[in-house]
Amino acid sequence: MARTFWILGSLFALMAVGAGAFGAHALRARLTPDLLAVWETAARYQMYHALALLMVALAASRWPAAGWGAAGWLFTAGIVVFSGSLYVLALSGVRWLGAITPLGGLAFLAGWLVLALAGSKALASGAP
């Protein structure tokens, strides 16, 4: 599990850097300022949660506790749904995609809650 989340986190971070650069250079002249802001939000949240996946991988490899896997998969789902829907919205201008985005946000929130619970359990058990 730790290896899977390490790989996913690294790849999502790589893609977030690429998306940010693509937005700053290739899309700046092609998108309206509001759609460019949507793109930048997608890349920023993707990076935050790619780093969270790396944190899950490190925690899972160090402290045995239930919950690491759930947190990692919730972060992964959040990246795909939240950032993915915003990327497509920015490129297509199709506004109804914004209705899907909050589902990804809920996955992010649930991931942070599960991470807090798993970490609390691991540290309460006397993990170093």
Image: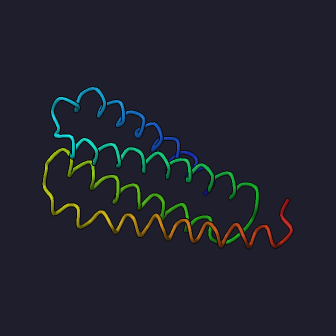
Counting from the top left corner in percent of width and height, residue 6 is at: 58, 47
Q: Position of residue 68 (x, y in %)?
A: 62, 65
* The residue positioned farthest toward the front in the image shown: 33
**Residue sitting at 58 percent across and 65 percent down?**
69
Observer-nearest of 10 and 93? 93
The N terminus: image quadrant: bottom right
Query: Residue 91, how many percent across, how many down?
Result: 18, 44
Q: Is residue 29 above or below residue 66?
A: above
- Location of residue 39 by image quarter: top left
Q: Is residue 95 above or below residue 106?
A: above
Image quarter of the C terminus? bottom right
Q: Residue sitting at 42 percent across and 45 percent down?
A: 44
Residue in front for this viewpoint, 38 or 113: 38
Query: What residue is drawn where x is 34% and y is 69%?
Result: 103
- Residue at 76% x, 61% y is 63
Q: Nearer the viewer, residue 1 or 33?
A: 33
Left or right: 24 as drawn, with respect to 50: left
Residue 23 is left or right of residue 17, and the answer is left
Circle count: 0
Q: Report x, y in % for residue 89.
A: 20, 52
Which color scheme did the rendering employ for the protein? rainbow
